[in-house]
Image (spheres, grey):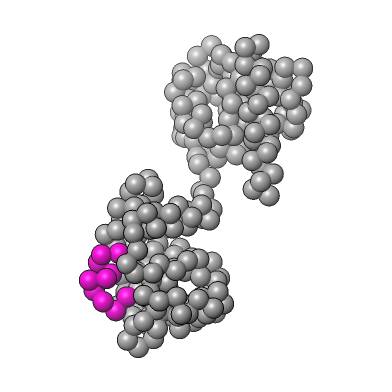
Amino acid sequence: MRIAIVDDLETERAQLKTRLARQLRLCGAEAELLEFESGESFLAAEKEQRFTAAFLDIYMHGMSGMDAAKELRKTDADCLLVFTTTSTDHALEGFQVRALHYLVKPFSEEELSALLAEMLARLPRPEPVLTVKVSGSDVRLCYRDIISAEHFAHLINIRTIALKTLVTRQSFKVFTEPLKKDPRFFVCGRGMIVNLEHAADFRDGAFCMTDGSSVYVSQELLKPARQAFMEFLLQRERIK
C-alpha cells in the first residue's frame, strides 16, 4: 500500500506522516508513506506508480490540492482521496472528485483512526497463501483453492479445486493453525477441516461440497457447524 502526503508545509507533512505511521501500526497494516511538497510533484510521481491513497492539503502554493485531485481523476479512478484542510468550503468540489473524507485541522487521533479503518475496509484484501511441502517441493496454495483436508497416518490429504489431492507430512495442528484464523474454514472434528466457500449444503450431518464429496462432522460439532455455515452464507450475501 502506497500513501501520498501532499502539503507545502514540511512540519505538517512530517506530523501527519508520524501520526499515520502510528495508527497503521495499531491497525496491524503496512504502508509506504511518501511526502510531496506540491500537487505537481505528487502527480509526477503518480504517473510512475499509482498510489493507494492520498492526503491532500487543499490550500497550497501553486497547484491546490483540489486541482491536483481533479487532474488525478483523469487517469486514476481508484485512489482514495482525503483532503486535509482548515475549512469545508470545497465540499461540493470534493464530492465531484469522489473524495473519501475531509480531515479538518486540527483533527484528533480518534478521527484519524476511524478514517484509516474505513480506508482499509475499502481495499481489496490479497488472497492468503498456504505453503506446504509436497514430494520434497514447496507448493503455494491459495486458501480459496482448498476444498477440504484430512489428516490420516501422519499425512495431510488436501483436496483442491483442480480435482487433485496433494499430500503433505505434518501435524494437523500445525497445518490448520493459519486456516482457522480465516472464517471460511471450519474444523469438522478430529483430523478434518473444510472450506465453507466450497460447501453447497449442509444435511445429514455433513457438508455437501461443490465437487460432489461429503465432509462429515463429528456429533458434538453438528450445531456449531450449522451455525458457522449459516453465518458464512449471510456474510457472503452482505458482501454481494
**Number of marks:** 0
Residue 29, x across and y down, in percent:
39, 49
* Extreme residue in the bottom direction: 62
| 77 left or right, relative to 237 | left
Front in this rendered view, residue 145 or 114: 114
Q: Is residue 9 covered in magenta?
A: yes
Residue in the foreground of this view, choosing between 135 and 28: 28
Q: Is residue 8 left or right of residue 69?
A: left
Q: In the image, is residue 124 above or below residue 213?
A: below
Magenta part mainly helix, strand or loop?
Answer: helix
In this picture, is 28 found above or below 35? Answer: above
In which quadrant of the rendered view does residue 145 lie? top right
The reply, left or right, for residue 213 in relation to residue 160 is right
Is residue 115 in sight in this rendering? Answer: yes
Q: Is residue 24 magenta?
A: no
Quarter of the image for residue 104 reads bottom left
Q: Where is residue 157, by image quadrant?
A: top right
Q: Which residue ends up furthest to the left in the rendered image?
A: 11
Residue depicted at x 56% and y 37%: 143
Residue 160: x, y in percent?
63, 33
Which quadrant is the N terminus positioned in? bottom left
Res 75 visible = no
Residue at image point 37% right, 54% down:
110
Residue at left offset 75%, top offset 29%: 201
Horizontal and vertical percent position of residue 229: 67, 30
The stretch of residues the image draws in magenta is 7-16
Left or right: where 26 falls relative to 14: right
Q: Position of residue 69 (x, y in %)?
A: 47, 77
Tell me the residue at 68%/21% (across/down).
215
